[in-house]
Image: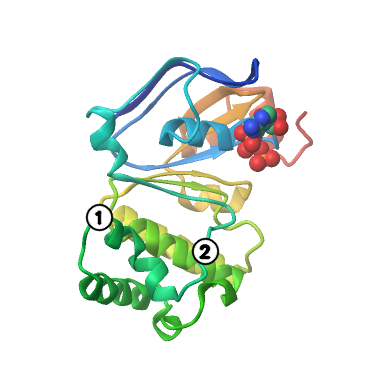
Amino acid sequence: MLPLTLDGAIARVRGKTLVGPVDLQIGATGLTIVMGPNGSGKTTLLRLMHGLQRVSAGRVDWAVPDGVARGRQAYVFQSPIMMRRKVVDNIAYPLALHGVPRRQARSTAAEWAARFGLGDALERPAPYLSGGEKQKLALARALIRQPEILFLDEPCANLDGRAIREIETILQQARADGTRIVMATHDMGQARRLATDVVFMYGGKVHETAPAPAFFKQPATAEARAFINGDIVE
Ligand SMILES: Nc1ncnc2c1ncn2[C@@H]1O[C@H](COP(=O)(O)OP(=O)(O)OP(=O)(O)O)[C@@H](O)[C@H]1O
């Protein structure tokens, strides 16, 4: 289904342009980190790519028909949405939705939970999990159908170091298993650890794109340089 191609893509809400026009291609492999100051449009860009935000002008095209692409991608929100049910049922939900019989869905969900360190929490009500556990649940639920591409919006915001490390390990493993990852993060250290390439957003536009080593070593724009240095970028 890749590359994903954005061609003059604009997201407008009530006449106000939030993002765009954006020309961008997400190639078949790698882990793309979307960075940029608050309000620069990272979330809106991810939502545009995943189809949660309507394209007001221009195009967002997969290499396969939209209907096919829709079933092969997943999205993890900053604050994951939990159903008021057991952990195992939350993780099994995408399988149940696609017609997998309940017993089989629950047994596959239990395997994924164990892999993500939630093996002891299967029968607990999901809303009572810690922040890190909730995010791992969200990742298991997103990955259980082995999507070709996974979008994540600040999945480690407000988590402690241990949870961040666990989640980064899960993401590296997903990538090794063939899932393309596109993720927004504020965490510069995390971006350096994970990114193969960077999309730097500024003022609702893609201001700079580069392979990660080049971006961190020698950003092309003053805004990206300031951002990397930890200066305030307005
Ligand atoms: N539904 C909406 N209606 C109006 N304005 C919106 C809407 N969603 C986002 N915005 C505005 O669009 C701009 C881009 O927001 P977006 O959330 O995409 O940025 P961001 O880079 O993800 O920010 P943050 O890092 O703070 O999450 C912001 O100015 C925001 O206030």
Q: Is residue 61 left or right of residue 152?
A: left
- Quadrant of residue 149 within the rendered picture: top left
Q: Quadrant of the N terminus?
A: top left
- Quadrant of residue 72 within the rendered picture: top left
What secondary structure is marked by label 2?
A: loop
Residue 11 shows in the view: yes
Q: Give the percent coordinates (x, y) of residue 109.
A: 31, 71
Instruction: First in sequence, mark 2 or 1: give its number.
Output: 2
What residue would you read off at disc 1? 98
Q: Please state which amino acid type lies under the numbered disc 1.
A: His
Task: Establish if 139 lies above or below 152.
Answer: below
Q: Please state which amino acid type lies under the numbered disc 2.
A: Met
Q: Is residue 129 left or right of residue 121?
A: right
Ligand 1 position by quadrant: top right
What secondary structure is marked by label 1?
A: loop
Q: Give the percent coordinates (x, y) of residue 16.
A: 66, 18
- Quadrant of residue 92 within the rendered picture: bottom left
Task: Establish if 193 lies above or below 29.
Answer: below
Q: Give the percent coordinates (x, y) of residue 40.
A: 66, 30
Q: Residues within 10 Å of mark 2 (few under 14, many from 20)?
A: some
**What whole-number distance in Å separates the C-alpha atoms at marks 2 and 1?**
19 Å
What residue would you read off at disc 2? 82
Residue drawn 26% across the image and 33% down it: 67
